[in-house]
Amino acid sequence: MSDITIGLLSALLATNQPQAVSNLVQQQTGIAVDVTADPVERELRELMLGDDAALDEVESWINTNSIPHTNTVAIAALNQRIKDRFGVVRQGYEHFLRNHPDSARGYLAYGTFLNDTGDEDGAQVEYENSRQLDPKNPAVWNNLANYYGEHSPITNAFAYYTEAIRLKPDEPVYYQNFATTVYLYRKDAKEFYNIGEQQVFDKALGLYQSAMKLSPDNFVLATDYAESYYGIKPLRTNDALLAWTNAMNVAHTDLERQGVEVHLARTKIAAGMFDEARVHLSRITNATYAGLKKNLVRTLAEKEHPTPDPSPAGTTNAIPASAHPL
């Protein structure tokens, strides 16, 4: 394993959500199995539980060790400790796969561990091993699509998300991942699907909408969908406001609701709906959003009362074309 910097690992572990033990094998390998009936599956389950415990333990070390960046000796010692801890898990997976080289779920679980610890190229190799053994598992197609979405070719990501959805059309995460990739790589999507930019936006939005139908109470998904409207020109005002209203309806906390108020205010300022924007701004009281609110209040004032152009009518300060060097 390559050296792990504390900052990078912290970012990786921040996305590693705790998983219910009873669902661990299904969540990481994409297939529900009866681990009590198969000794191989029991062994894999124990490995995966150990994998999860190691990630939690390392995250705890990072959170409880406030090491100055200048203390290179202490940083190196912690990195070595992390490397050793993950090395135990790595050896466990490698031992398991030597004994069970036909375990598609084993390769997929090992790939997931490698991805979680920053070895994305190593993860891709294990995902491919898993796919060769079990091409009907949608999780491995999704994970490979995620890899190609970051490392290219992007067209592989498009094709692999499509296959994951074909195999498991009721999994919202696959649609969400696919939507994000289409949205981010619009040029590639235009060429791959032979469509225009607005049609690319429509495709991404449609994928988000499919995900939301399957997971209607998912606030993060709802906000991802609503935020996608910021990149669409011209602004689809009504659709954007409807998306943010939906996000408001599925917000779980006051902090989330006030975050949506920020976006509603921003969208309405952009659309020239100044009075309504001011109402949303008045509802933002949490200190977390104080800076954003201040900026939006200033933007609103500038939009409502633009500074007159001081130049006399019919004159310009532009340099004549003939004055530019050839």
Image (tube, grey):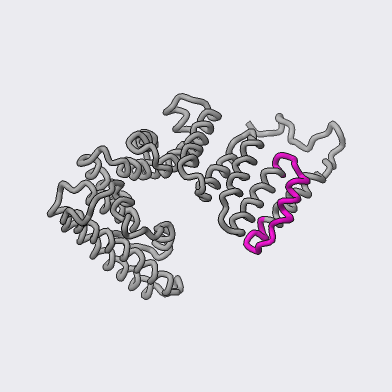
| Quadrant of residue 43 within the rendered picture | bottom left
Image: magenta residue range: 269-292
Looking at the picture, tell me which residue is in the foreground, 165 or 318.
165
**Number of residue marks:** 0
* Magenta-drawn stretch contains 59: no
Q: Residue at x 87, y 37 (%)?
A: 312
- Image position, residue 259 (x, y; %): 62, 54
80 is higher (above) or lower (below) than 311 = below
Q: Residue at x 18, y 48 (%)?
A: 103
Magenta span: helix, strand or loop, mainly? Answer: helix
132 is higher (above) or lower (below) than 53 = above
Q: Is residue 153 visible?
A: no
- Looking at this rendering, what residue extends furthest in the top direction? 194
- Image position, residue 51 (x, y; %): 29, 61
* Magenta-drawn stretch contains 280: yes
- Image position, residue 117 (x, y; %): 33, 58
